[in-house]
Amino acid sequence: MAKIIFEDNGEEYELPDGSPIQEACEQAGVPFACTEGVCGTCVVEVVEGMENLSDFNQAEADFLGELDMERLACQCQIKCGRVKLKF
């Protein structure tokens, strides 16, 4: 099981390895709009564990430009391990 921790509110969610992070992010309070990677409403900052998330996809590259510590929560899956996010 993988774990997402939200720095903003301290909430933690366990997810099966390879799961999308969108539902856990919604429950923690991350806002969503299009859920297709074009609006950017769900941008989160990865504080720890970027290596435990899926690779950046084209929608993220198109919206975020330089790929650094931000991800679109609607586009990510957690591979394994622990990830700490900030929104």
Image (cartoon, helix red, strand yellow):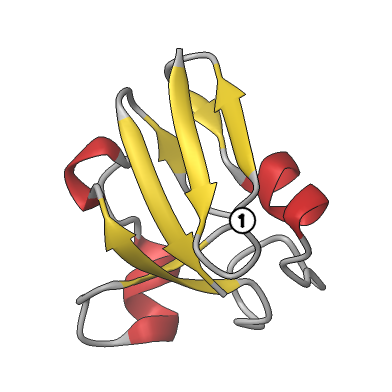
Q: Is residue 28 left or right of residue 65?
A: right
Neighbor class of circle 1 (other Cα within 10 Å; few <14, some 14-19, many 20+) is many
Q: Position of residue 37 (x, y in %)?
A: 58, 68
Q: Position of residue 46 (x, y in %)?
A: 34, 64
State the SS at label 1: loop
Q: Residue at x 69, y 42 (%)?
A: 24
Q: Residue furthest front?
A: 10
Q: Nearer the viewer, residue 52 or 75?
A: 52
Q: Residue at x 58, y 70 (%)?
A: 8
Residue 34, by quadrant, is bottom right
Q: Position of residue 45 (x, y in %)?
A: 40, 73
Q: Residue at x 60, y 39 (%)?
A: 12
Q: Is residue 60 left or right of residue 22?
A: left
Q: Residue at x 31, y 65 (%)?
A: 47
Q: Nearer the viewer, residue 74 or 50?
A: 50
Residue that mark 1 sits on: 74
In the image, what residue type sits under mark 1? Answer: Cys
Badge count:
1
Q: Is residue 7 left or right of residue 41?
A: left
Q: Position of residue 31 (x, y in %)?
A: 78, 72
Quadrant containing the C terminus in the rendered view: bottom right
Q: Is residue 69 above or below residue 49?
A: below
Q: Is residue 42 above or below residue 19?
A: below
Quadrant containing the N terminus in the rendered view: top left
